[in-house]
């Protein structure tokens, strides 16, 4: 299945100014963030390699979610939010002005902490909503819906209730619907902001399975408070920490087994072993 | 099993719900009594107004019969009695429809601007200004309309009558295009903008932020997000706001009296000079036409009262039925 932009306002080159499809790497350099003039994130540099799962861990309020939202230009939607630094999607700086914010967000999808399907749209329309927003037509809608829902591990549960409203699903199903919706626009990176924190263990396991399944075709960056989850799903791990009255910084980043097995910084060791936070 | 059958088996007396005694304190009872009393008093007052209009106005119907609804004019003195609300009802509806056609898009755009686009620092000020516009007395609107709006709009009316005359309602039989139902509707339309805008603004601002972010995160532009998330969510609220505005438009009196030159001729050409509405009929002719005239106007008032009440009840029914999306817990 291929996405074909037939609307003349969205030619293929417009939709994806960065050439290429499939998973892309993200590199953040010296990223800082402010809310209403208060510095909350300072000098974050992190590479999130193509086709890997990167976990952002750390206690609440250390700027993980802010950092995540900077990666697809959602941060600037918050009133009073400012930022500095650069974020490169396969070498193209998403803040340099060549890419529109809407194109950036289509290339770098996002799943939120609280499932947010469109409650008044059917399951089917929810999956296709991203294409409708961008007026992209697709050669075979039914196939795209099936593929997206299958990737998100939801197809078997909903294949006979496509016309039911998205809001009628359980919380775990809603979250997987949101993942399917995000995958339907074929993003190159998928950001997940504590996607399982509102879900039961069974749903959590299904979503972790989904992450493992999709990591080949889409780079995943996930914020999580669950150490076991970070250990289970991620290849790379970055530990954020904010000292009292100071902005959040990355304390340590590297392969997950190193961060959990033999971290160099004592604070990382304390955190991943549950000694604080 | 045996125990269960013994306790609630079919042989036993039917279970009855227990009565829970509520030991309310005196202050609580007094307050509840006061609230209940005033609440009912409002309803009783509403009913009594309707009843008063009916009883006082009925003699006019006794004279005119059903022709009251199919006659246009106000001839209540002399040998030939000729009075009724047909043209006035028609004019009332036309003015309200023109007002809605003009006011609704402006009001909804205003509400969207205030909730989605206005700079955050200026927003409270702008909201206050829009709400304040609702507090301007209608006589001021009327005066402004006749000295300022009408001289500037007759040109547009004339242009429409020349170039859009293939649309039947824009055709004119006489070249005079001032003092028309259209211009009356226009000023009433401006008057209802703040009402519709403030109700729809409230509803738009209730749109779940998660849904808006979800749309934006999928690459939606702000306008696409508004069309697919904010407007569908606010649909019920928009309908009720429009109906509230319509209730106001139907009853608007003084601005219409100032603008409209009275004519009991029912014409589909809304740009043409002359017309009448029920409220205008009552305001202009009150105290004329003797006893029968008063009775006829009171019954005309009852008709207007009933129409407005029906519109408002329908509006509240739509609001309470559900705002799209609001019934779903997320």
Image (cartoon, coloured by chain):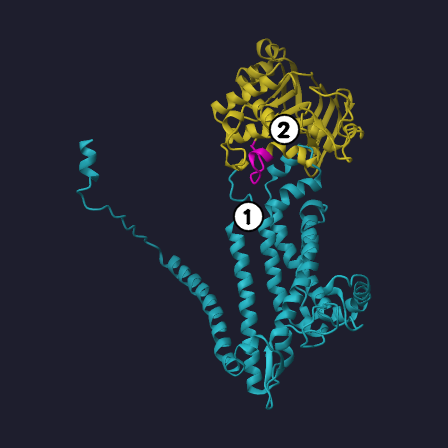
Chain colours: A yellow, B cyan
Report the chain holding disc 1. B
Disc 1 target residue: B323
Residue under mark 2: which chain is it in?
Answer: A
| Farthest bottom residue in view | B79
Residue B14 lies, in percent from the top left, at 22, 46
Q: Callout 2: few (<14), some (14-19), or many (20+) C-alpha neighbours within 10 Å? A: many
Tell me the residue at 67%/36% (across/down): A132
The residue sitting at 75% across, 35% down in the picture is A7
Q: Is residue A95 magenta?
A: no
* Quadrant position of residue A224: top right
As helix, strand or loop, the secondary structure at mark 2 comes to: helix
Direction from residue B325 to residue B35 in the image, left or right: left
Question: Range of the magenta residues?
Answer: A114-125
The reply to whether the magenta stretch includes residue A119 is: yes
Residue B247, compared with residue B84, is above or below; it is: above
The residue lying furthest to the top in this view is A262
């Amino acid at each position: 299945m291929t996405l074909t932009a037939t609307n003349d306002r969205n030619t293929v080159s417009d939709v994806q100014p960065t050439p290429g499809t499939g998973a892309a790497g993200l590199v953040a350099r010296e990223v800082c963030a402010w809310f209403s003039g208060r510095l909350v994130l300072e000098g974050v540099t992190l590479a999130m390699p193509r086709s890997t799962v990167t976990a952002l861990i750390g206690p609440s309020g250390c700027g993980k979610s802010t950092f995540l939202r900077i990666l697809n230009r959602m941060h600037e939607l918050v009133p009073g939010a400012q930022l500095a630094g650069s974020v490169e999607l396969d070498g193209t700086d998403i803040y340099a002005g060549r890419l529109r914010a809407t194109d950036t967000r289509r290339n770098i999808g996002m799943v939120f902490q609280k499932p947010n399907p469109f409650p008044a749209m059917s399951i089917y329309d929810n999956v296709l909503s991203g294409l409708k927003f961008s007026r992209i037509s697709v050669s075979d809608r039914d196939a795209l819906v099936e593929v997206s829902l299958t990737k998100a591990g939801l197809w078997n549960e909903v294949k006979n209730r496509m016309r039911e409203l998205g809001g009628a699903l359980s919380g775990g199903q809603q979250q997987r619907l949101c993942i399917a919706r995000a995958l339907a626009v074929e993003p190159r990176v998928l950001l997940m902001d504590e996607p399982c924190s509102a879900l039961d263990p069974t749903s959590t396991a299904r979503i972790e399975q989904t992450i493992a399944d999709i990591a080949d075709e889409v780079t995943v960056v996930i914020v999580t408070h669950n150490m076991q989850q970070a250990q289970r799903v991620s290849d790379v791990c970055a530990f954020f920490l904010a000292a009292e009255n100071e902005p959040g910084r990355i304390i340590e980043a590297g392969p997950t087994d190193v961060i959990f097995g033999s971290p160099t910084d004592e604070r990382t060791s304390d955190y991943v072993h549950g000694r604080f936070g | 099993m045996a125990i269960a059958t013994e306790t609630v088996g079919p042989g036993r007396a039917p279970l009855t719900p227990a009565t829970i005694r509520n030991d309310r304190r005196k202050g609580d009872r007094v307050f509840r009594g006061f609230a209940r009393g005033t609440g009912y008093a409002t309803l009783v007052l509403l009913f009594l107004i309707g009843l008063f209009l009916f009883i006082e106005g009925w003699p006019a119907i006794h004279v005119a019969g059903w022709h009251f609804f199919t006659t246009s004019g106000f001839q209540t003195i002399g040998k030939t009695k000729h009075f009724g609300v047909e043209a006035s009802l028609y004019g009332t509806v036309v003015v309200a429809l023109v007002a809605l056609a003009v006011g609704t898009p402006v009001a909804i755009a205003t509400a969207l601007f205030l909730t989605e686009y206005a700079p955050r620092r200026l927003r409270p000020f702008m909201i206050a200004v829009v709400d304040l516009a609702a507090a301007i007395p209608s006589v001021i609107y009327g005066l402004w309309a006749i000295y300022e709006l009408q001289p500037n709009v007759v040109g547009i009316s004339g242009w429409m009558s020349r170039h859009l005359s293939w649309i039947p309602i824009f055709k004119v039989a006489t070249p005079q295009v001032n003092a028309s139902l259209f211009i009356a509707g226009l000023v009433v339309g401006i008057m209802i903008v703040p009402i519709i805008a403030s109700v729809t603004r409230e509803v738009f601002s209730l749109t779940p932020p998660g849904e808006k972010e979800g749309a934006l995160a999928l690459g939606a532009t702000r306008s696409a997000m508004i069309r697919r998330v904010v407007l569908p969510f606010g649909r019920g609220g928009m309908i009720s706001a429009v109906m509230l505005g319509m209730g106001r438009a139907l009853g608007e009196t003084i601005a219409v009296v100032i603008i409209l030159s009275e004519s009991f001729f029912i014409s589909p050409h809304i740009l043409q000079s002359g017309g009448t509405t029920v409220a205008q009929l009552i305001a202009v002719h009150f105290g004329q036409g003797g006893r029968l005239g008063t009775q006829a106007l009171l019954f005309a008032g009852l008709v207007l009262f009933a129409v407005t009440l029906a519109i408002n009840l329908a509006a509240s029914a739509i609001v309470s039925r559900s705002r799209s999306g609001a019934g779903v817990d997320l």
